[in-house]
Image: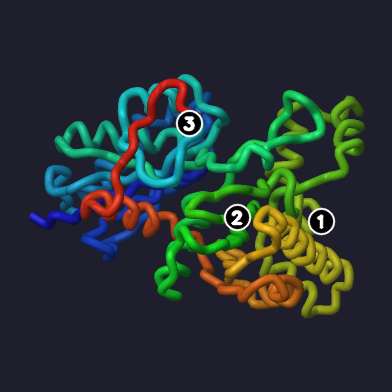
Amino acid sequence: MITEKILVINPGSTSTKVAVFEGETAKWVESINHSPDELKKFKKVYDQLDMRFGLIKQLLENHHEDIAAFSAIASRGGNMPAVKAGPYKITDYMVECLQYRPLDEHAANVGAGIALKLANEAGINAYIYDALTVDEMLEVNKITGLAGIRRPARGHNLNTRAAALKLCEEKNIEYKDTNIIVAHLGGGITINLHSGGKIIDIIMDEEGPFSPERAGGMPVYSIVKMAFSGKYTEDELMRQLQRKGGLLSHFGVLDIRAVEKMIDEGDEYAKTVFDAMALSTAKNIAKISPCVQGKIHHIVLTGGLAHSKRFTGQIIKSVEFLAPVTIIAGENEVQSLANGVLRVLRGEEEAKILVEGEK
């Protein structure tokens, strides 16, 4: 039996990514796609648990994987109560929170329940790592200009922290002694500031740069007028901001390469919007730096859009005065989950337990 064999589960909105790792090495990675017709049968994300569980079991059988041979199971962490960074053991209480009291609907909410069900069958532990709701933000960074409205700490914590840790490993520097800005460039763009071994500030995709599908930070009075125009329900307006904004709003496409092609063909409007997205990202990277008096040691650009040399090149020109910039392209969530749980198995990190009232 391989003592470091890890099953990784990463539920997405229209697919479930499943992987098997032996140590740091992926034995196989495969995505199970879910059709719109299949998904529309379910009112809530969590209602999809049995469907996704059954498909994962079938996939494991197809790969001749024995669930009893795994050392641990890793799942992406959903919108549970605020937690610290790092590993948490999946418990009945965590699953209950995600099923009945999620902070928001998200495909990741179903992951812990699937992982615990599989782990109970195998007689092993299951873990989440760097959940969506990691909250180590300084109190001063949560205050807004309206009493009762606070800036929440939600972002691409799994990928951004993994990128920061990878940078530190490559540079042979201590994570806890380094101030790092990590920009996750994907369907949504979020920017995290890591200092003292914690994520002390986050610019979320609802307040920062626009992106392929997010509207980003908007003039608030204009949004108030939209809300009361009678043209939108609450859900419709939220979709405009979360799923129909950004490049999709301007061009009807999500793929940044399609916009780059328009630019190459001489489309000046496409160039202006592209430049605006890059500049907005750069401005928000700079915006977060005063939290450490501008003492930034490194900047990391990660996520799917980091594959675009044109996009990252424009950002780098605008922010390299702050600190050296490193590109770690891609959304490395499956590898990050496996690496995190591997550190638990090796005794390098201790898994925490989510308790009622945790903040």
- In the rendered image, residue 220, in percent from the top left (x then y), is placed at 86, 38
Is 311 left or right of 182, judged from the image as shown?
Answer: right
Query: At label 3, which amino acid type do we have?
Result: Met
Image height of 246 relative to 268, above or below:
above
Q: How is the image coloured?
A: rainbow
Q: Do the numbered discs 2 and 3 sit on residues whose CB atoms are within 8 Å? A: no
Callout 3: few (<14), some (14-19), or many (20+) C-alpha neighbours within 10 Å?
many
In depth, the one of 188 and 44 nearer the eye is 188
Residue under the point 22% across and 45% down: 72
Query: At label 1, which amino acid type do we have?
Result: His
Query: At label 2, which amino acid type do we have?
Result: Leu
User: Of the residues tagged 2 and 3, which is closer to the observer?
Assistant: 2
Q: How many marks?
A: 3
Is 84 left or right of 188, judged from the image as shown?
Answer: left
Callout 2: few (<14), some (14-19), or many (20+) C-alpha neighbours within 10 Å?
many
The residue tagged 2 is: 193
The answer to which of marks 2 and 3 sits earlier in the sequence is 3
The residue tagged 3 is: 80
The residue tagged 1 is: 250
* SS state under label 2: strand
- In the rendered image, residue 305, in percent from the top left (x then y), is placed at 61, 65
Residue under the point 51% across and 54% down: 196
Residue under the point 77% across and 61% down: 283
Q: Quadrant of residue 34?
A: top left
